[in-house]
Image (cartoon, rainbow, N blue to C red):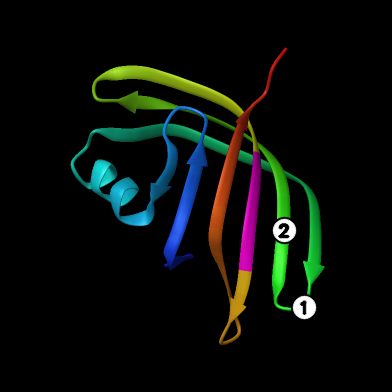
């Protein structure tokens, strides 16, 4: 409900992942999360577009294997009919 129909996730591991593909792996149980945090660091408004930069951490499982991530997150939001919906999420791993 918080993303556009054409929302996409960009990851180093998989490239561009469609909304449908991500929702499918969640629905099948192939992907699940135990924890998810997001610390917003920067928000910039450009009319009906917002760019949000954050740092996110999560843990869970992917196809039965434990996963964890510490990532820089860039989200692009559009104001559509008075609601802010995410249209693109880009993840970059935090390196030590």
Q: Position of residue 14 (x, y in %)?
A: 41, 33
User: Going by the image, does 50 lie left or right of 27?
Assistant: right
Mark 1: few, some, or many residues within 10 Å (few <14, many ≥20)?
Answer: few
User: Going by the image, does 68 lie left or right of 29?
Assistant: right
Q: Position of residue 13 (x, y in %)?
A: 45, 27
- Is residue 27 positioned above or below 13 on the image? below
Mark 2: few, some, or many residues within 10 Å (few <14, many ≥20)?
Answer: some
Question: Disc 2 marks which residue?
Answer: 51
Looking at the image, which residue is at 69% across and 17% down?
95
Q: Position of residue 24 (x, y in %)?
A: 24, 48
The reply to whether callout 1 and callout 2 are in contact (CB within 8 Å) is no
Looking at the picture, tell me which residue is in the foreground, 30 or 10: 10
Label 2 sits on a secondary structure element that is strand
Label 1 sits on a secondary structure element that is loop
Answer with the quarter of the image where residue 45 lies: bottom right
- Is residue 57 positioned above or below 25 on the image? above
Looking at the image, which residue is at 61% across and 72% down?
78
User: Going by the image, does 59 lie left or right of 52?
Assistant: left
Looking at the image, which residue is at 48% across and 32% down?
35
User: Going by the image, does 26 lie left or right of 81?
Assistant: left
User: Quarter of the image containing the N terminus?
Assistant: bottom left
User: Quarter of the image containing the C terminus?
Assistant: top right
Looking at the image, which residue is at 41% across and 20% down?
67
Q: Which residues are magenta?
A: 73-77
| Disc 1 from disc 2: Cα separation | 11 Å
Q: Main secondary structure of the magenta part?
A: strand
Answer with the quarter of the image where residue 52 lies: bottom right
Residue lying at the far bottom of the rendered structure:
81
Q: Position of residue 8 (x, y in %)?
A: 46, 53
Q: Which mark is residue 47?
A: 1
Q: Is residue 1 magenta?
A: no
């Amino acid at each position: 409900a918080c993303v556009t129909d054409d929302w996409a996730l960009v990851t180093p591991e998989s490239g561009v992942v469609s909304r449908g593909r991500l929702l499918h792996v969640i629905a099948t149980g192939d992907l699940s999360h135990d924890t998810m945090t997001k610390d917003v660091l920067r928000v910039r408004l450009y009319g009906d577009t917002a760019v949000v930069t954050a740092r996110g951490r999560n843990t869970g499982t992917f196809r039965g294997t434990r996963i964890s991530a510490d990532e820089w997150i860039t989200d692009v939001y559009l104001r559509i009919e008075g609601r802010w919906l995410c249209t693109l999420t880009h993840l970059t791993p935090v390196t030590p």
